[in-house]
Image (cartoon, helix red, strand yellow):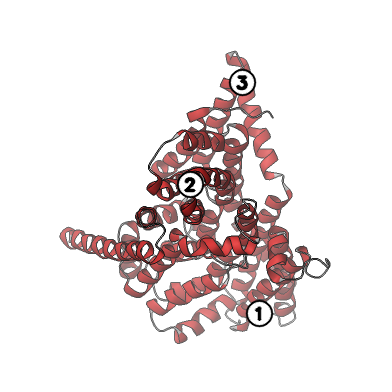
Amino acid sequence: MEAIQAGWLSILPPVIAIVLAFLTKEVISSLTLGILSGAVIYAALSYDGVVMVAAKTVETAFSTMGATGGSVSKFNILLFLSLLGALVVVVTKAGGSKAYGNWAANKLRSATTAQLATSALGALIFIDDYFNCLTVGTVMKPVTDKYGISREKLAYIIDATAAPICIIAPVSSWAAAIGSSLSVTGEFESDLAAFVATIPFNFYALLSLVMVIILCVTNLDFGPMEKAQYRAKTQGILGASEEQENAAMPTGKGRVYDLVIPVLALIIFSILAMLYTGGYFTQADVTTLQQAFGNCDSSASLVMGGFGALLVAFLLFVPRRLLRFKAFMESITEGVKSMASANIILVLAWTLGSICSDVLGTGEYVKSVVLASHFPVAIIPAVIFAVAAFLSFSTGTAWGTFGILIPIVVEICASAAPELLIVSLSATLAGSVFGDHCSPISDTTILSSTGAGCNHIAHVSTQMPYALLVAVCSFVGYVVAGFTNANLLLSLGTAVVLLLAVTILLHRIAVKKEKASL
């Protein structure tokens, strides 16, 4: 399919999908209409005649969907999701999740420690954001449920410690991709050096982690999240998705290790598989873990890890008769079915992103707008952050966004502000991760709601005020950085103080509104 340059029309499909998702609270139909609108735009600009446009619209939509869903890496992600769904149901039926929840409830004696433990686990699983989202949710749901923490809050903690952690972790599937994109600029000694240089100025990632800690320790919730937490604490309505509400009952015979061992197996097998696919065991020129993680096929590795964990669960449960062979196999089927909605949403989100980037030329349009703009040198980092945030939110992809913008940023800074190159590149990554964190069509947003057992739109709507607040504070930080010649202490300090002050203010406003309504 030959791509076209649709200009400003190229941003309409994601805008339509996002607006409809918020208005209807139904994401599948919204994504479908977004895809069809992109196909209509492509067909209308490429072909004459009403009949031809109608025919080409259908052809464009289905051919793009087929190309997107058919790639090996994306198929592996869908397969991993299905395997993980099977593992969750198997462990739940065996009683492992219930046993772990009871044990953890005795060790973690408050909602605060439960939330902090969830955040810590999210920070520890920094190798891959997909792996992070699903594993943390699987392990911590019994614990957070025990203390009346809403699924929306759990999904936010998972999401805010997924992509924001991976983008500042030197050993992750993100690090090599980002480092290789940065090192081609010729400004850094190596991929790792390029990546590490951007970490201190990646304000969105850093402030997201600060925000999580603030909310876990102080419970200064506001907006839709405050209502969700109030509902969970006073009415016991956690906001679990329909699939979670209908989950199979456990046998009650399980032990704590019946959850811990399969999860550890998932982690260990996935890490070993990443090292294997990255050439650590097979290629002489791959000598470091960072190289191996950078070269790995993360989606294939996760499939290997998921299959290995499921095999361990079989050997752990069936011989002990926690589950009979037939019940084990039925649980696998049930688990795969539970992931059907998430798989459909992922395919539709990928298709919409493919239409924007590969068919309508959304990235090229944004590039032309940026290059044609003339603005003061001091606000270059802030403007770049805003552009990256808009593009990543619209397309739901961080990797695609920084892949498009990094060469543009290097060109702009080389001619206008060489001293702001590093902070501008960091702003590009920070804006890119914003969309990956909170866009309704982002795969990690979808996986976070899936891992937490939370309605997807409920997750998006409750975390959006937090993500936007962090983005605004990051924008202010980049403004300060531009006017202070990239002074890290002053710019990051300003952003953190502003974040804390506004969070307290918004919480007080939310409490006053709640008291007034009583």
Tell me which residue sits at (39%, 40%) in the image.
375
Which badge, 3 or 2, comes first in the chain's sequence? 3
Q: In screen coordinates, is 219 left or right of 365?
A: left
Q: Quadrant of the N terminus?
A: top right
Kindly report the distance in space between the C-alpha atoms of the residues bearing marks 3 and 1: 56 Å
Reading the image, the residue beneath label 1 is 261
Reading the image, the residue beneath label 3 is 46
Which one is in front in this view, the residue at disc 1 or the one at disc 2? Answer: 2
Q: Quadrant of the C terminus?
A: bottom left
Which one is in front in this view, the residue at disc 3 or the one at disc 2? Answer: 2
Q: Is residue 445 visible?
A: yes
Q: Which residue occupies the extreme top position in the image? A: 49
Which of the two residues, 211 or 138, is positioned nearer the viewer here?
211
Q: Which residue occupies the extreme bottom position in the image? A: 106
**Is 9 located above or below residue 265 in the figure?**
above
User: For mark 3, does the 10 Å Cα neighbourhood hold few (<14), some (14 to 19), or many (20 or more) residues?
Assistant: some
Tell me which residue sits at (45%, 47%) in the image.
384
Q: Secondary structure at mark 1?
A: helix
Amino acid marked by disc 3: Ser
Which badge, 3 or 1, comes first in the chain's sequence? 3
Which one is in front in this view, the residue at disc 3 or the one at disc 1? Answer: 3
Amino acid marked by disc 1: Ile
Reading the image, the residue beneath label 2 is 388
Amino acid marked by disc 2: Ala
- Residue 54: mark in rendering: none
